[in-house]
Image: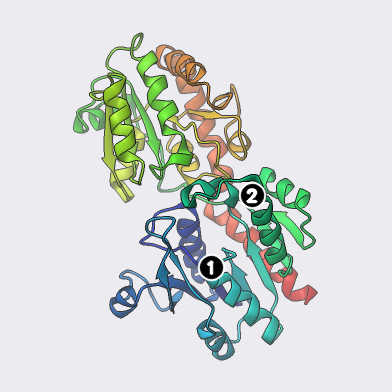
Amino acid sequence: MKIAIFTDTFPPQINGVSHFVWKSAAALAKNGHEVRVFIATSSKDASKKLSGYSDNPSLIFLPSLPFFGYPGERLTIPMGFGIKEIAKFKPDVIHLHTPFGVGIEAVLAGKIFGIPIVGTHHTFFDHYLKYVYLDFEKIKKLTWHSTMAFYNRCNLILSPSKSLLEALKIGKLKSLAQIVPNFIDTEFFIPAGSEDEKKKLKEDLDIKGKLLVYMGRVSYEKSIDQVIRALAIATKKIHGLKLMIVGDGPYKENLKELSKKIGVEDKVIFYGFARGKELLKILQAGDVFITASKSENMPLSVMEAMSAGLPVIGVDSLGVPEIVKNNKNGFIVAPDVFEDIAKKIVELCEDDKLRHKFALASRELALEFSEEKIVKLLEEAYKKVIKNK
């Protein structure tokens, strides 16, 4: 197949959508498909071209401007550049990943040339309105209305999680829809080989006790403050307990101030970004992965931690309970109750057998999200819309 993929977010931006877009494009190309990825980028990025990308999948750069409301993000004004490239490429299917400028170009191209359109809706956009000071009920309703109007122009909608798919249906989605989860590299994200190896990895990170790991964007909607507050309680019972925050974002300084205020600044490690083997070593050194975020759809960070054999503590909101099974590979607690998070931290850190049991279950559950299985679902989805068209 000839596949055109459109996205407003792409590496070097670090988020779940950009990661999934690039990895799925590369996997499809590896399976023999001709793939072109249309991305929003600056002229500076376009001139130097992003390093490490081959001719298949190849990148098509669309002019864009910085988005004032969310640092690091860019927006494209639909001006037809993508449509011209589609006229030359003549793809069998168009797959869009965002309902913004680049996504609009994808819809226009599909309608003009009669190409079937697959759209993946990755997240609950209304959860991000706080960043642009538009967190009002009327604006939330308008956001959902415009999102539905956009995705109803697609022939098939893919959703990573059941919770988001149900929300789309409640929001009057008329297009055909199905679940296609995110995937992870289960052959790369593997557990530590032994307790001795885990101990050595901890020594390399200068960790002497139990290690909690959070990985992801350090931003307001991730509720990392709840994790830090829970840590402050748990450290009273678990001596030497540390929390490592892997990632960066606009809320880091606020969290540093909070850590200092409640007396755990020496127990919170703001590691920054980590990729590849460096990231894997951190996960393998960890004892528990923890997130208090209420805005997760199908978080890659949680899935990668599970694949690396970490039990998970998460909150009962949106997609997290779909991948973290309470009392099987971790604990699910009520949102915004950091005291309950603290109790589960203590329980897992004090019970080595339980933690080991949950770790094995995490790895087993993560294998359901392998690249091979999920890319096959993508290919079947493309074939379905091409046949129907």
SS at badge 2: helix
Label 2 to label 1: alpha-carbon separation: 35 Å
Query: How far across and down, in percent of the image, does residue 185 sit?
Result: 46, 50
Which quadrant of the view contains residue 151? bottom right
Residue 387 sits above or below residue 292 on the image: below
Which kind of residue does numbered mark 1 sit on?
Leu
Residue 378: image tag: none
Q: Quadrant of residue 150?
A: bottom right
Mark yes or no: residue 196 visible. no
Q: Which residue is mark 1?
A: 28
- Horizontal side of residue 358 vs 199, given as left or right: right
Q: Residues within 10 Å of mark 2 (few under 14, many from 20)?
A: some
Mark 1 is surrounded, within 10 Å at the Cα level, by few (under 14), some (14 to 19) or many (20 or more) other residues, namely: many
Residue shown at the point (80%, 61%) measured from the top left: 174
Q: Is residue 48 visible?
A: yes
Q: What residue is at 74 percent from the left and 46 percent from the top?
A: 166
Q: Is residue 288 above or below residue 274?
A: above
Viewer-nearest residue: 388 or 71:
71
Q: Residue at x 63, y 82 (%)?
A: 109
Q: Give the mark nearer the N terminus: 2 vs 1.
A: 1
Q: In this rendering, which labeled residue sits more in front, label 2 or label 1?
A: 2
Which residue ends up furthest to the top in the rendered image? Answer: 237
- Is 364 left or right of 63, judged from the image as shown? right
Q: Position of residue 207 (x, y in %)?
A: 24, 25
**Residue ID for mark 2:** 140
